[in-house]
Image (cartoon, rainbow, N blue to C red):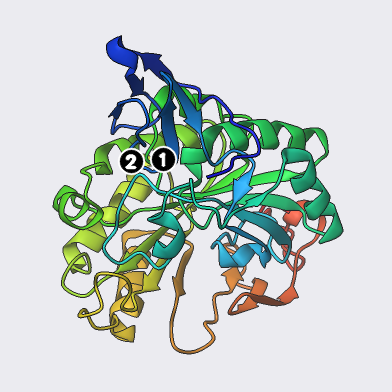
Amino acid sequence: MILVSLHEAEFYKKLDGGNVHCLLCPRLCKIQPGQLGNCKSRKNIDGKLFALGYNRFTSVHDDPIEKKPIYHYKPGTSTMSFGTAGCNLHCDYCQNWSISQISAESNNMINITSIQALEKVRNNNCDTIAYTYNEPLINFEWIKDTGKLAHENNIGNVLVSNGLINKEPLSELFGIIDAANIDIKAFNQDFYRKVTHFPGLDQIKENVLLMFSEGIHIELTMLLIPGYNDNKEEIKQFAEWVLNSMNDKVPIHFSRFYPHYKMQDVPPTPVETVLEASRIAEAVGMKYVYTGNLPYSEINSTICQNCGVTLVERAGYSIKKKNLGKNASCKKCGEPSDLII
């Protein structure tokens, strides 16, 4: 293994015998010399913890921001997306398992500094950087450093994450992250324990509320898996939590599951299950409910809550039409929308 530059991690303690205690996420790994933490991206080298994903990436691509999915923050723009290796969850159905479940010691990674990342943003006419693909928060140091530099250059920062991080490091990203889509795997702890292999739901919910309270634009995604997390009552409880803990305007995305990784024996989610989930959330009182991964090009338009006109007409990841005036107001009635442009 050759690393261009080793970057010492933040949020860890040195222990006796050359061991270290990682404090980045709720797993709180105690790591012996020469070993990796559970996320496979942080390594104890001679009694110091290093972030192996710093400046090293498996996946780099310019994407429509709607692909994240982020619908209410800079709709219709492109975001330069960066993914490294490893994850602090190990979902049996992970669609990105080929990068999320490998070590950041992999030789199949490309080296990109923060400055080079910003160059890619400009060269591809993107408005934002997205930290995405695998679990980005395990590359906390690069997000913090790159995110600060991005803001200095009027570039936004988008986080696509499972939300599993401790509160102290998360607080250091306040003022850096502008928008986040947090993947709520299920709304029951048993699912997290058995399918993601860590019972982190309560901490993730707390982190979502913290980010929301700090003014970060929040959107939430739930992938519906037949027989695992598609219970109507669970979906209702999830929507009620969003409504009562935040507000009725937080965008929710329900997505269709397709067999992946260790869950090849589970059938795809029936389309009706996804549509029913959206109806349940709307009946609870949520204003913006979207669907994803359906076998046709989804029509996920954003509607003015005052007059009913279509503010943003979408087909799949494409924007067909916008009816937005000054400061993202409705062109027809002038009502301020809930979009950030």
Question: What crowding class fits label 1: few (fewer than 14 Cα within 10 Å), some (14-19), or many (20 or more)?
Answer: many
Q: Position of residue 146 (x, y in %)?
A: 69, 37
The residue lying at 43 percent from left, 64 percent from top is 98
Write down the residue under mark 2: 205
Query: Is 60 or 37 nearer to us in this picture?
Result: 37
Answer left or right for 318 relative to 17: right
Query: Is 12 or 213 nearer to us in this picture?
Result: 12
Classify residue 172 by image quadrant.
top right
Answer left or right for 115 relative to 25: right
> How far separated are the C-alphas under marks 2 and 1?
5 Å
Question: What crowding class fits label 2: few (fewer than 14 Cα within 10 Å), some (14-19), or many (20 or more)?
Answer: some
Q: Position of residue 275 (x, y in %)?
A: 35, 79
Can residue 325 be seen here? The reply is yes
Residue 97 versus residue 256 in the image, above or below: above
Secondary structure beneath label 2? helix
The residue lying at 58 percent from left, 29 percent from top is 7
Residue 36 versus residue 70 in the image, above or below: above
Answer left or right for 200 relative to 169: left
Q: Amino acid at mark 2?
A: Lys
Q: Position of residue 81 (x, y in %)?
A: 64, 56
Q: Position of residue 49 (x, y in %)?
A: 45, 25
The residue lying at 39 percent from left, 68 percent from top is 254
Classify residue 305 by image quadrant.
bottom right
Write down the residue under mark 1: 208
Residue 311 versus residue 268 in the image, above or below: above
Label 2 with label 1: CB-CB less than 8 Å: yes
Q: Quadrant of the C terminus?
A: bottom right
Secondary structure beneath label 1? helix
The residue lying at 30 percent from left, 69 percent from top is 224
